[in-house]
Amino acid sequence: MTRALLHGGIATAIGSLPHPDAPLAAALMLRTLPDLPAAPSLPCRSPLEGMLAQWLRALPEITVHADGSLHLQSDSACAGDLEISFDRLAHGGLIGFLDLALAQPRVPKAVKLQTSGPLTLALALCDLGMDIDTAFARALECSSAWSVAMVALVKSKLPDAEVVLFFDEPGLTHWADEDPIIDVESASDILSGALAAPECVVGVHVCGAGALDVALAAGPDVVGIDVHERWLDHAVGLARFLDGGGFIAWGAVPTDRPIGETTSPLWKSLVGLWCDLTQRGCDPVLLRRQAMVTPACGLALHGATQAERALRLTRELADRVFDQALGTRLSIGA
């Protein structure tokens, strides 16, 4: 998939759902987000689908226990080639999603995948006791290998489907601090290396108050951020990103507070932020033409009914974005 196949008003999800049943979770994604359904991770189904256990299991120097906890082997000699394989214990959500997508009367034209990014994985390895240089090198290797394998898995099952793959980076909040473990430029270079590995559209999900400048400098096709006034301080960087053809996946449906039943307050917040960004130099047309819509974060901590409501509101907001994006094209004859 190339950026040219993206358009304003695509709805997708960040990734996690609360369901213990993979087919039910997959059906929800395919039903509510038909243009770009997201393969869910299901940590409530299995702790092995947690965002660290699911991917660090590939490193032979890491032991992943049944409860999802991690242990670094004390003997560094155990480090070696990565062991990349998909099974229903650790990847039940992904496998169930692909199985159900293949069985649809109309197979999705595009799907969205997600893996933990190298910066987040590296910080976890450092916390386990691995030295800094080794941790970041192994994390980059791990995140890159999984991303390539995921795209290959999709192509083996859905050969005609395009792929959008997000690297989830909650660890970017570390680079918003004044004294990060490695400098900002090095962090961007490592993230950029992971983004270059898979042959598909790539995105970075910036959780909360993460370092957006690190994500933008890494060169993603899409950057995912929540709807918050903190991004006004990054208006120049976002304007450049949009001018270069980048898409913003707006986390316009909050996942940390009640959301109600209608899109009206959510739409007001999104459009209000667009207006403020426009005043600081962002192109109002590009803000709409290159806008995707997602929940602000994963939905694993919500109830199943709440998660479905969040996805429904995401789709409804995306429809409104699509209408505005189409309107801007018609108004200037594009």
Image (tube, rainbow, N blue to C red):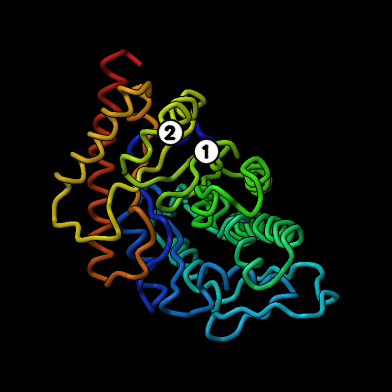
Quarter of the image for residue 259 reads: bottom left
Asked if residue 60 is positioned above or below residue 308 in the image, the reply reads below
Q: Residue at 67% across / 47% down in the picture?
A: 190
Query: Given the image, on which type of amino acid does mark 2 rest?
Result: His
**Can residue 161 be seen from the camera position used here?**
no
Within 10 Å of the Cα at label 1, are there few (<14), some (14-19), or many (20+) other Cα atoms?
some
Q: Is residue 117 left or right of residue 234?
A: right
Q: In this image, 255 relative to 56: left or right?
A: left
**Is the C-beta separation of discs 2 and 1 under 8 Å?**
yes
Please give the label number shown on residue 213.
1
Query: If you read the primary sequence from the N terminus, does the residue marked by circle 2 or circle 1 appear first?
Result: 1
Q: Quadrant of residue 63?
A: bottom right
Q: Is residue 210 above or below residue 6?
A: below
Question: What numbered label is drawn on residue 234?
Answer: 2
Q: Position of residue 308 (x, y in %)?
A: 26, 63
Q: Residue placed farthest to the bottom in the image?
A: 66
Q: Residue at x 43, y 79 (%)?
A: 45
Q: Residue 143: x percent and y percent?
A: 64, 58
Q: Which of 155 and 241 lies nearest the eye of the viewer?
A: 241
- Give the residue at the far top of this rendering: 333
Image quarter where the C terminus lies is top left
